Amino acid sequence: MPLRDFESWMWAEACEMLDRADRLHRQFFRPTAMHSKPPAWEPPVDVYETRNEVIIMIALPGVAPEHISVLLEDNCLVISGRRHLPVRADADIRRLEIPYGRFERRIELAARNFELGAREIVNGCLFISLRKI
């Protein structure tokens, strides 16, 4: 293998390892924490703001709507719930990259008054509207 191809291969492998480490860091999962009270993972969010509202999109694929709680506490939006492992008890897990167990995400809001608006799940994402009052 020529030296240039070897360097390119090493660089690609290093980048892939960094990407993998970043995904694991963002979706921190501890199997022993699945039945404990502290959250085992934190879902990623996107926040958009218009003149009249703040729209928050939380990635929660595979989480049933009845397992999601949304609270507005002072200047913080708290989304919590649980994603259950969808396999049977007799199944052997070969790879587990999607986090399971209790989750919680706290989103600090600007110092102003908000009112919870519409909530809907679209394509595995929870959309929450916060109306500015």
Image: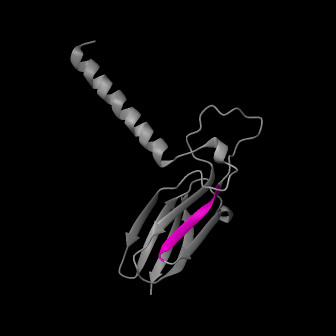
| Position of residue 64 in the picture relative to residue 78 (left or right) | right
**Where, quadrant-wise, is the C terminus in this rendering?**
bottom left
> Residue 121: image x %, image y %?
57, 65
Residue 8, compared with residue 98, is above or below; it is above
Q: Magenta span has 13?
A: no
Q: Magenta span has 76?
A: yes
Q: Which of the 4 image quarters holds residue 51?
A: bottom left
Q: Residue at x 36, y 28 (%)?
A: 13
Q: Residue at x 30, y 28 (%)?
A: 11
> Residue 66: image x %, image y %?
68, 65
Find the residue positioned furthest to the top: 1
> Residue 32: image x %, image y %?
66, 43
Residue 80, compared with residue 40, is above or below; it is below
> Residue 95: image x %, image y %?
59, 34
Q: Residue at x 36, y 77 (%)?
A: 50
Magenta residue span: 75-82
Q: Which of the 4 image quarters holds residue 87?
A: top right
Colour logic? one colour
